């Protein structure tokens, strides 16, 4: 069984959520603190979308590299490697962004939190709407083809 349809749907829904958060938080940020608020909202939603997208993309890449075996060391190596890269990049970005005058950190944090929560909900919806069989790799009597 392939998780590709679920992950691609999750990526699509997550992108829509990030776009909605960027628009809504951008307008709110613009009214709250002007251009720094707008930039904080856009940067927060883009950052959240990129990091959440990298998670799904790493799972797709890992599934392809492990040839569909979700329990192989290659799969876990790719996913955990991407997690480590994301962690280091996140720390570097946060240390760099905290001293920037062109960014309102409160609006940035609110946009990141809203985008992450929205993406979690989008992931749940993508998973709930997926048609996944209860049992995979099973041949019913009368079906033709090679043994699984």
Image (cartoon, rainbow, N blue to C red):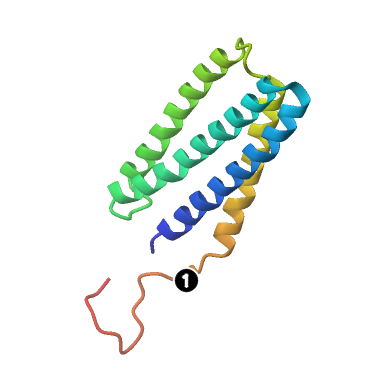
The answer to whether residue 86 is left or right of residue 38 is left
* Side of 129 where 148 appears, left or right: left
From the viewer's perspective, tell me whether residue 81 is left or right of residue 109: left
Q: Residue furthest left?
A: 146
Q: Residue furthest bottom?
A: 142
Q: Image height check: is 85 above or below 3?
A: above
Residue furthest right in the image: 32
Quadrant location, the N terminus = bottom left
Residue 119 percent across, percent down from the top left: 60, 45
In this view, 68 is above or below 145: above
* Residue drawn at x 55%, y 58% as measured from the top left: 126
Residue shown at the point (33%, 54%) measured from the top left:
69
In the foreground, 43 or 119: 43
Q: How many marks?
A: 1
Q: Which residue is mark 1?
A: 133
Task: Give the image location of residue 41, x and y in percent.
Answer: 65, 30
Please state which of residues 19 and 55 is positioned toward the viewer in this rendering. Answer: 19
Looking at the image, residue 29 lies above or below residue 66: above
The crowding category of the residue bearing disc 1, from other C-alpha atoms within 10 Å (few below 14, some 14 to 19, many at least 20), is: few
Q: Position of residue 120 (x, y in %)?
A: 61, 46
- Asked if residue 25 lies left or right of residue 49, the reply is right
Specify the quadrant that holds the C terminus: bottom left
At x 67%, y 22%, the residue is 35
Q: Position of residue 34 (x, y in %)?
A: 72, 22
Circle 1 sits in a helix, a strand or a loop, which is it? loop
């Amino acid at each position: 069984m392939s998780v590709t349809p679920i992950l691609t749907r999750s990526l699509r829904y997550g992108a829509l959520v990030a776009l909605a958060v960027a628009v809504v938080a951008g307008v709110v940020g613009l009214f709250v603190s002007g251009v720094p608020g707008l930039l904080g909202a856009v940067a927060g939603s883009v950052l959240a979308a990129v990091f959440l997208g990298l998670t799904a993309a790493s799972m797709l890449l890992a599934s392809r590299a492990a040839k569909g075996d979700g329990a192989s060391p290659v799969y876990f190596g790719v996913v955990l490697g991407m997690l480590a890269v994301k962690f280091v990049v996140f720390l570097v970005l946060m240390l760099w962004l905290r001293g920037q005058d062109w960014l309102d950190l409160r609006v940035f944090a609110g946009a990141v939190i809203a985008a992450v929560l929205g993406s979690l909900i989008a992931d749940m919806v993508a998973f709930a709407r997926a048609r996944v069989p209860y049992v995979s790799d099973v041949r019913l009597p009368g079906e033709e083809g090679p043994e699984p």
